[in-house]
Image (tube, rainbow, N blue to C red):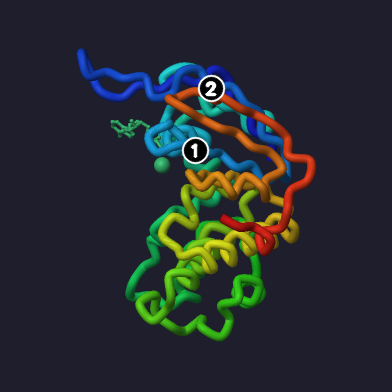
Amino acid sequence: MKIKVNDVHKFYGNGDSRVEVLRGINCEIQDGEICVLLGPSGSGKSTLLNIIGGIEMADAGCIDIGEDCTKRMNEKELTLYRRNHLGFVFQFYNLVPNLTLKENIEVCAYLSKNPLEIDELLRTLGLYDHKDKLPSQLSGGQQQRCAIGRALVKNPSLLLCDEPTGALDYQTSKEILSLIEQVNRKYRNTIIIVTHNDAIKNIANHVLKMRDGMIVSDYVNENPISASQLEW
Ligand code: ADP
Ligand code: MG
């Protein structure tokens, strides 16, 4: 799914403490690409991702999603957009602690019109042998795989990942990035990865760099490398 961000502004706070955290963002993300959104902490990456995902609203400007525009959508249409087209992955896995891995994924499939087959998805995630375990019985990397499964099971056209490796060690981070690459090849979804880790830009087709609420660099990476070759 193609995304176009048109002159988006966002403010937080009131009166003297009012600050503009997004100061006129323009960018275009093409269907099927892996886009890495880079920038230091506080630069506005999560705010932009949340606005693209329809979980926060811009104060000015709008997001075009395919043929639609979030600004013209009412609450119900926004809910359907999030439900049918979007998957979100966060730094902390947000699994339901008293459900097994498989159940964690199943509860996310219920609302979907066209869910993926769960056992096959568990195999893709490398979790099939652990499907009946509780999150507390798993490593951080396995929990993040499950979180990716929860986001993916409804077969979203757009997968938004906010610091997906932020809580993981070096080796596990590379494994999770490899999984994201594999998912992109298999399901052909558009993926946005937010990170403050500069090295991760090397696996992207498209790199956006933010600073102080603005995009300071926007380029196509002609020769992305695979995550297994990444070093930092
Ligand atoms: P990043 O993800 O790049 O670290 P964020 O988008 O989370 O940046 O935040 C950008 C700026 O907006 C920061 O200065 C942050 O403190 C501020 N901010 C984020 N969310 C809120 C909020 N809900 N209320 C007030 N300020 C916020
Ligand atoms: Mg953030």
Q: Position of residue 137 (x, y in %)?
A: 38, 81
Residue for point 52% across, 68% down: 172
Q: Amino acid at mark 2?
A: Ile
Q: Nearer the viewer, residue 180 or 122?
A: 180
Mark toward the start of the polypeptide (1 vs 2): 2
Which residue is at 51% across, 30% downward?
Answer: 210
Mark yes or no: residue 91 visible.
Answer: yes
Q: How many marks?
A: 2
Mark 1 residue element: helix
Give whichever of 10, 87 is nearer the camera.
10
Secondary structure under tag 2 reads: strand
Looking at mark 1, is its residue's CB closer than 8 Å to ligand 1? yes
Vertical comparison of 61 with 56: above or below: above
Query: Is the N terminus in the top left, top right, bottom left or bottom right quadrant?
Result: top right
Task: Name the spot of residue 218 as percent of width and height, x first.
Answer: 64, 29
Q: Residues within 10 Å of mark 1 (few under 14, many from 20)?
A: many
Q: Is residue 122 above or below residue 213?
A: below
For label 2, count other residues whose C-alpha is less than 10 Å away and answer few (under 14), some (14-19) or many (20+).
some
Q: Name the residue tied to disc 1.
A: 49
At x 50%, y 17%, the residue is 24
Residue at the far top: name it. Answer: 15
Q: Image check: 132 left or right of 97?
A: right
- Amino acid carrying label 1: it is Leu
- Residue position marked by numbered label 2 in the rendering: 25
**Dividing the image into four equal quarters, which quarter contains ligand 1?**
top left
Asked if ligand 1 lies within 8 A of label 2, the reply is: no
Outermost residue, right direction? 222
